[in-house]
Image: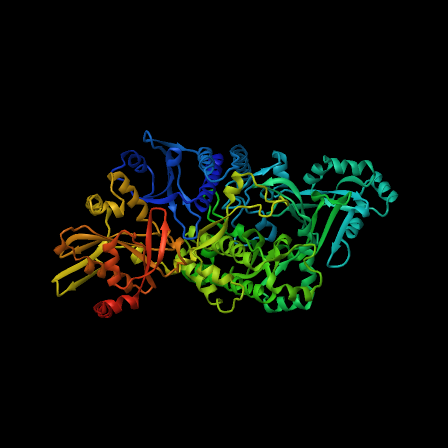
């Protein structure tokens, strides 16, 4: 029995799309948290969570629209793309009624919630695209099964790898949407179905054609020589009648679209343009759909396609055509030769030629064709070069992913552990990626959109990364700081291509393409496939960039390793607002948002924020007071009722504001304990529980947004339950907390943000070495921002220095 055929394809396609949608939501909205365990005081949700197979869920707080959502998590990723189980649960808050919510219901809730922040939400359009994406993926999966097509072979040719990206963009809410294609179009023109077709040819007056080729001979002339003998008698006579007219190839779908346009019909009526039809060799689509390839042709053609692929019509804009031409010319100069000599790890697949058509002095975007050199032509067709997005794709229909196959097979061949090979493989990828790309940007000023679908990896005989190929004429830019260098190499460059980018906006956008999408995409693939620990991989990424910090003059490296948040593209919000990213009238057609920087985790303290034990972690005897103070991480099963009682004490209410029913406090703890934000510890004085302190990490905690936080900053909240003055020992208890915090080498300084009204707290922390840095206005309080360094603490409390040395 073929187990693949026993899988419900439609249901599977929905789960793939649902996973992508949830991940997009978690990237772009902040009203979610991890939720740990089964609650004791929320009976309605407890009953339903017990039926799910995981102990960790994502909870989305939709209380503003009357509900909350619970999603079972099977893998939580440090790099930001997670794996889930289904069904997803929705609880109506007013009634506590819990029911499953499908992908369409979730999208409807998202659209309703998003209206609070975004005015132009178009729910009906995104629903259509969502349905289209699911239906299309079902078609592709059925084709895969029925034709026994593989997407995970150890070795694949260029075009096999290009056409193996079955699941699509892993962080797009409608990854397989292609609005404009009917079912037949889908089968013929999709890379997932290995479609093959002849190009459609037009014969056009040369006065209406703009054509360039940095490599010399115009492509239309060579095409004419190939196509003329193939024409039928009628079309040969037509061309003989207009011998100066030039042949222009076109994607067959786009040709049909163009022939329905009024300006093209006028051109036909005036004898400026003639439609010849389908001729010549068969081409097949690459992963982008609109770029087509033939192993017998030295050119690839990237056409405009008025099909909404994901959320945008894929149109070549006229300036983008010139970018390919510019970089092709530039690479022929000494500038280009030196660049390629200095950084042989990067090979640029350029588009040296283009064809455009104009009418009444206006460019018709549908005719814009970018023409790319084909390095996988003839005997090079079987080169083991793979699209990075396809390499990072999850396993399909229960099969292992290609990356998993490669790493496991290599480990077997080399006699090494799978994790060791995965780490070595990733180190090699960083070696050919990070230093060369940062070096090219600094020395030569060239910036490229190195996202997963623009990058291909050549694998060596051991299946390790050997070379990076970058493609996409739209993605070549030059930084302002090297404009003079580039202009001297090629005078007039960027005049038509509009390819100079200012230094200020470079780092945020470049980080998104190079790090978030590309490098962390590889981290995620290795992690999701259980090949390596993502924390170890992220540490390698941090170190690779840190090594270059003093060499980088652009600010890119500092932004990557030091910023609390990065600029990230919001595909879901872009789709919800029906923004067409190909709209040349929009200065910033896509939505970009701030998201947490994963590389900050290099300085993350597990012992403070994610302790693995619930036993005592530190204790200290104070001889003068004859007391022993000890601390241990909070245990929700043992400590919850006690801490609830503490927070409902009268002296706790004004400052902690955590009094109230047990259900509410339990919700808070079950979302805080699995987070990267903070944790809770219980403190004992002579074995009697008496205080709590909550270390937090400003890189994830709200306070980090109110000052220039460093990844090594940590803070703590402190609460003493004891009210009898002679038994409180507040100062000593706080010392124990700081002893433990400063004992950890990953901690730089300790932050405080006590309310300006908390006078007793202010007195204590001043005695401990905290200094005021200013007043900050937070949503829930006005607070003194205070800093305490290790040396400052030890100066005020020298006995703590001795204690640290003894420990």
* Quadrant, the C terminus: bottom left
In screen coordinates, is 228 left or right of 459? right
State the image quarter where residue 538 is shown: bottom left
The count of marks equals 0
Given residues 518 and 690, the one toward you in this image is 690
Q: Percent x, y for residue 5?
A: 49, 37
Residue that appears at 44% across and 55% down: 597
Residue that appears at 27% across and 42% down: 666
In screen coordinates, is 689 left or right of 378? left
In screen coordinates, is 716 left or right of 732? right
**Color encoding of the figure:** rainbow
State the image quarter where residue 526 is shown: bottom left
Determine if residue 300 is in view. no
Given residues 253 and 374, the one toward you in this image is 253
Q: Percent x, y for residue 262?
A: 74, 35
Placement of 352 over or under 230, stated as above or below: below
Q: Percent x, y for residue 436?
A: 55, 65
The residue positioned farthest toward the right in the image shown: 241
Q: Percent x, y for residue 789?
A: 31, 65
In screen coordinates, is 316 left or right of 759? right
Determine if residue 135 is in view. yes
State the image quarter where residue 699 is shown: bottom left
């Amino acid at each position: 029995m073929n187990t693949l055929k026993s899988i419900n394809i439609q249901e599977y396609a929905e789960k793939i799309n649902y996973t992508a949608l949830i991940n997009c939501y978690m990237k772009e909205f902040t009203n979610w948290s991890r939720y740990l365990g089964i609650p004791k005081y929320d009976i309605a949700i407890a009953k339903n969570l017990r039926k799910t197979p995981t102990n960790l869920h994502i909870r989305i707080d939709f209380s503003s629209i009357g509900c909350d959502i619970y999603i079972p998590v099977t893998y939580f990723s440090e790099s930001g793309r997670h794996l889930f189980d289904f069904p997803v649960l929705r609880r109506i808050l007013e009634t506590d009624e819990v029911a499953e919510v499908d992908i369409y219901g979730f999208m409807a809730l998202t659209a309703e919630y998003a209206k609070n922040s975004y005015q132009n939400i178009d729910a009906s359009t995104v629903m259509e695209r969502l349905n289209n994406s699911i239906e299309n993926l079902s078609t592709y999966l059925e084709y895969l099964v029925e034709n026994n097509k593989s997407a995970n072979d150890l070795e694949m040719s260029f075009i096999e790898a290009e056409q193996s990206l079955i699941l699509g963009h892993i962080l797009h809410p409608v990854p397989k949407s292609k609005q404009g294609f009917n079912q037949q179009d889908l089968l013929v023109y999709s890379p997932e179905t290995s479609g093959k077709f002849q190009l459609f040819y037009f014969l056009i007056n040369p006065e209406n054609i703009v054509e360039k080729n940095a490599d010399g001979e115009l492509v239309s002339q060579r095409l004419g020589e190939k196509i003329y003998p193939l024409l039928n008698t009628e079309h040969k006579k037509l061309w003989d009648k207009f011998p100066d007219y030039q042949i222009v190839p076109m994607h067959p779908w786009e040709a049909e679209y163009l022939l329905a346009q009024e300006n093209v019909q006028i051109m036909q009526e005036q004898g400026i343009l003639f439609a010849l039809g389908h001729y010549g060799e068969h081409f097949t689509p690459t992963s982008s759909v609109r770029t087509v390839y033939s192993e017998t042709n030295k050119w690839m053609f990237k056409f405009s396609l008025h099909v909404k692929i994901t959320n945008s019509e894929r149109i070549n804009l006229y300036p983008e055509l010139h970018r390919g031409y510019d970089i092709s010319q530039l690479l022929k100069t000494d500038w280009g030769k030196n660049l390629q000599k200095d950084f042989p790890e990067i090979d640029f697949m350029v588009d040296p030629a283009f064809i455009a058509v104009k009418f009444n002095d206006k460019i018709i975007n549908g005719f814009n064709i970018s023409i790319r050199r084909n390095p996988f032509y003839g005997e090079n067709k079987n080169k083991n070069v793979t699209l990075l997005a396809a390499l990072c794709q999850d396993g399909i229909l229960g099969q292992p992913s290609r990356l998993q196959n490669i790493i496991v097979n290599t480990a077997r061949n080399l006699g090494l552990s799978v994790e060791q090979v995965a780490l070595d493989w990733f180190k090699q990828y960083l070696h050919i990626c990070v230093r060369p790309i940062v070096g090219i940007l600094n020395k030569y000023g060239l910036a490229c959109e190195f996202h997963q679908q623009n990058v291909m990896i050549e694998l060596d005989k051991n299946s390790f990364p050997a070379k990076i190929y970058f493609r996409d004429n739209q993605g070549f830019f030059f930084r302002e700081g090297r404009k003079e260098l580039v202009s001297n190499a090629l005078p007039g460059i960027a005049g038509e291509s509009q390819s100079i980018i200012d230094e200020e906006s470079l780092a945020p956008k470049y980080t998104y393409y190079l790090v978030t999408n590309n490098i962390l995409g590889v981290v995620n693939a290795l992690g999701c496939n259980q090949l390596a620990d993502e924390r170890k991989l992220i540490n390698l990424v941090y170190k690779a960039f840190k090594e270059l910090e003093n060499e980088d003059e652009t600010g890119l490296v500092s932004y990557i390793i030091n910023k609390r948040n990065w600029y990230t593209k919001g595909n879901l919000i872009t789709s919800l607002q029906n923004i067409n990213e190909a709209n040349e009238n929009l200065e910033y057609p896509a939505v970009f948002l701030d998201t947490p920087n994963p590389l900050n985790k290099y300085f993350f303290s597990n012992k403070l924020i994610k302790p693995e034990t619930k036993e005592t972690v530190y204790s200290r005897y104070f001889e003068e007071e004859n007391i022993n103070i000890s601390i241990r991480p909070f245990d929700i099963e043992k400590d919850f009722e006690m801490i609830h009682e503490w927070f409902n004490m009268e002296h706790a209410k004004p400052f902690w504001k955590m009094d109230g029913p047990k259900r509410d406090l339990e919700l808070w703890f079950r979302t805080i304990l699995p987070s990267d934000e903070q944790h809770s510890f219980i403190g004992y004085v002579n074995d009697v529980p008496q205080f709590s302190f909550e270390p937090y990490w400003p890189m994830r905690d709200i306070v980090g947004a109110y000052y220039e936080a460093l990844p090594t900053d940590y803070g703590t909240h402190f609460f003493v339950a004891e009210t009898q003055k002679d038994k409180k020992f507040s100062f000593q208890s706080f010392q124990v907390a700081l002893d433990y915090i400063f004992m950890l080498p990953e901690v730089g300084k300790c932050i405080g943000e006590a309310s300006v009204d908390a006078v007793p707290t202010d007195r204590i922390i001043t005695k401990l070495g905290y200094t005021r840095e200013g007043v900050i206005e937070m949503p829930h309080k006005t607070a003194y921002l205070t800093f305490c360094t290790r040396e400052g603490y030890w100066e005020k409390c020298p006995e703590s220095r001795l204690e640290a040395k003894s420990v």
